[in-house]
Image (cartoon, grey):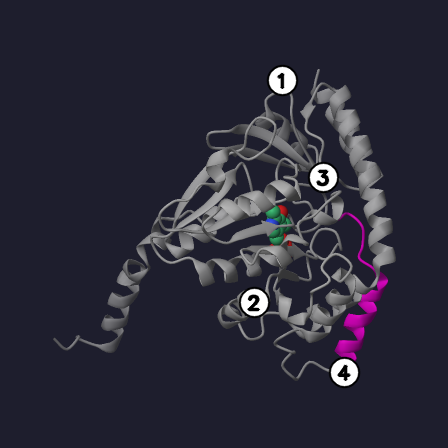
Amino acid sequence: MVPASPSAARLNWIKNSVEYVRSNIQAMDGYTPGEQPQGGKFIKLNTNENPYPCSPKVKAAIGRVCQTGLQRYPDPAATAFRRQLCELLTGELPDISPEWILCGNGSDDILTIITRTFVDTGDVIRYPNPSYVLYKSLADIQGAEVDVANYQSDWSLPPEFSEPQDRLKLALLANPNSPSGTIVPAAAVAEIADALPCPLVVDEAYVDFADANCLALVAENEKIMVTRTLSKSYALAGLRFGYVVAQPQIISELAKVKDSYNCDALSIAGATAAIEDQAWLAENRAAILATRERLTNELRSLGFECVDSQANFVWCRHPRHDSAQLYRDLKSVGVLVRYMNYPHWGEGLRITVGTDDQIEAFLAILHPLLH
Ligand SMILES: *Cc1c(COP(=O)(O)O)cnc(C)c1O
């Protein structure tokens, strides 16, 4: 039947268009990132950003790109960054060449590319609980099912994590983990990867704050992909740059799925300059680790239970105080921390390691809330 008028037809389409949305998208909640209040009146200890400004060399490199102009498309392969990264990582992974690296618009983009490459509707994605909440959203978007294995009480992985399962296509492991800051040793990760029937992503977003990493495993096992980001340790969350290291035959498949220009000219130049300045990284890391130790000790002396963290945050609970209430009380006086409540696990507070001044102010505010 011919519609009465074009506008009536359009109205009808608008009314019904939501019904055309894929059913798994309609059903999903969508990922909620930590609060990002704009304006800066909070002491912000909720999303694991680095509290210090990035290396001045990053700003200089971005400035040079601006001067040259932005009328051309960027290098789709981010070659300058990949070459620089090879120089940085060759000591740990002697086989590495640019063909082992794919860059992305933050490592969330990398995780999306990996999921789209390996996981079909009805397939299964496995990850531990509690961990990075984005993994569930990635599965939901694909229309995949999730198989969640609870961490054991000592933050090691349960045996189920490595067991074969029908339609299991991808396993994801944040290492160091968020929210716990704990690490699964490389030897255990190697065994898990050998036992798993599917590829394993080792999400090393926080690895620069840790004592160890899984990079060397990539040469031994083509199932292992190591993802990293410049958001945390290089203080570049606002720039958006991450990468994955995997064997070249895997990288070529991932490259088919990414947007052609997923990294822009400014972020490629900034990220390249950032990893070139290892003196900045070493100094920043030392500052964060010193503050992390202070924060952990102070929290424990206030009665909190906290695990030793290998990341730039500390996960804690107080046996006599409700975490949600503490979160709200802190927020009402201008301190943002992350309150998390995980299904089949429980709740707690994740506190990002800020500057010494921020942590001192936080502790001064926290102390009277506990009486
Ligand atoms: C922050 C984070 C990421 C991603 O960060 P990007 O800013 O997208 O690079 C990935 N995994 C974990 C566990 C994180 O905490």
Looking at the image, which is closer to me, 333 or 151? 151
Amino acid type indicated by mark 2: Ile
The residue indicated by pointer 3 is: 310
Amino acid type indicated by mark 4: Thr
Q: In the image, what residue occupies the spot 70% across and 39% down?
A: 313
In the displayed structure image, the side of residue 354 where residue 248 appears, left or right: left
CA gap between label 3 and label 2 equals 28 Å
CA gap between label 3 and label 1 equals 23 Å
Amino acid type indicated by mark 1: Pro
In the displayed structure image, the side of residue 62 where residue 192 appears, left or right: left
The residue indicated by pointer 2 is: 251
Q: Main secondary structure of the magenta part?
A: helix
Identity of the residue furthest to the left in this view: 1
Say the numbered circle drawn on residue 319. 1
Q: Nearer the viewer, mark 3 or mark 2?
A: 2
- Among numbered discs 3 and 2, the one appearing first in the sequence: 2
- Among numbered discs 2 and 4, the one appearing first in the sequence: 4
Q: Residues within 10 Å of mark 1 (few under 14, many from 20)?
A: few
Mark 1 in CB contact with mark 4 (< 8 angstroms): no
